[in-house]
Amino acid sequence: MQLRCIAMACLAMCACLVQSQDYCRAELCPVNTMHIGCRNRGNFSRSCPPDAARLDIHEAARKQVVHAHNTLRQKWASGGGDTVSRSACRMATISWDQELARLAELNTRQCLLEHDKCHNTLKYRNSGQNLYMAGFAGIIPSSVERILKRAMDDWAAEGSDITGEQLQAFHLSGPDVTHFAVMVNEANVAVGCAVTRFKQQNFHHFLVACNYGTGNELNKPVYSSCSVAGSGCQDQGQSHVPRSLLTG
């Protein structure tokens, strides 16, 4: 009974938080596109099995997500890419955004590996999104951190396939590098993630969604390259030597 009460309390909180914003506002989404939060009460979709449940992304897990992103961004901004060595003129530091996390949770409550059509916010009008699903027949990961790490490692691994041409002007030809590109997009300043667990066809599934402050834009640079890393940063209070990511 106690667990059920806790689950109901979490659901009520999610619905309240979503309804506190008017996600049906026309200016948030492209024409004839419905926002994931519009008239969404935060219930699990009919496509979800009865045992579907959200996993709590506690403070340590949130810090893990932010650290993993900024470590990857630091590596590439410093010119240490896997196959392409191009230093970034500037690259913003990513931080956790709870509104993006709440909207990511609405995606995972569908229990489907499908991007929602719109999850923009008043602050982030071109929000990006990465999805990941893993199924386990035997031993399952013991913590939400392990699931998040698998997702982020999978996305980051796409960096071995990205080309210098794609970094300069993003395009979709060739191997899929869209997840990686969002992770290292120079303009990204925020991320928020959610995880839902459910059992289907004797497999324990974990669905991860991370929403970002900005998404990939065709023919726009993932990040602009300079001979000196960080030379395009506007924060004059920090060194341009990329020991830490610089906001600009």
Image: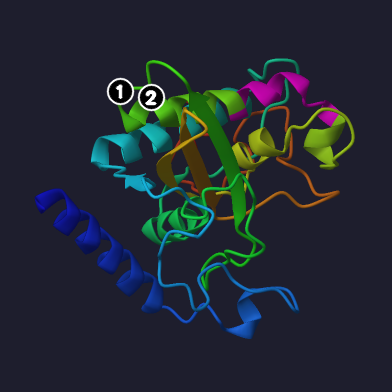
Horizontal and vertical percent position of residue 77: 61, 29
Magenta-drawn segment:
155-164
Q: Where is residue 157 in the image (x, y as percent from the top left)?
A: 63, 21
Judge by depth and name the residue closer to the eye, 25 or 199: 199
Q: Residue 146 carries which label?
A: 2
Callout 1: helix, strand or loop? loop
Mostly what secondary structure, the magenta segment?
helix
Residue 124 visible: yes
In the image, residue 211 sits, relative to residue 134, either above or below, namely: below
Residue 223 coordinates in the image, percent (x, y): 70, 40
Which residue type does callout 2 highlight? Arg
Q: Which residue is drawn at 27% across and 68% down?
A: 12
**Residue occupying the point 53% across, 76% down:** 38
Q: Which residue is at the front of the view, 209 or 235?
A: 209
Colouring mode (rainbow / by chain / secondary structure / one colour): rainbow
Which residue is most to the front?
Answer: 201
Which of label 2 and label 1 is nearer to you?
1
For residue 142, the mark is 1
* Label 2 with label 1: CB-CB less than 8 Å: yes
Q: Is residue 71 left or right of residue 164?
A: left
Kind of residue sitting beneath label 1: Ser
Residue 145 in the image: x percent, y percent? 35, 29
The alpha-carbon separation of the residues under discs 2 and 1 comes to 7 Å
**Based on the displayed image, in which of its 4 quarters is residue 66 positioned?**
top left
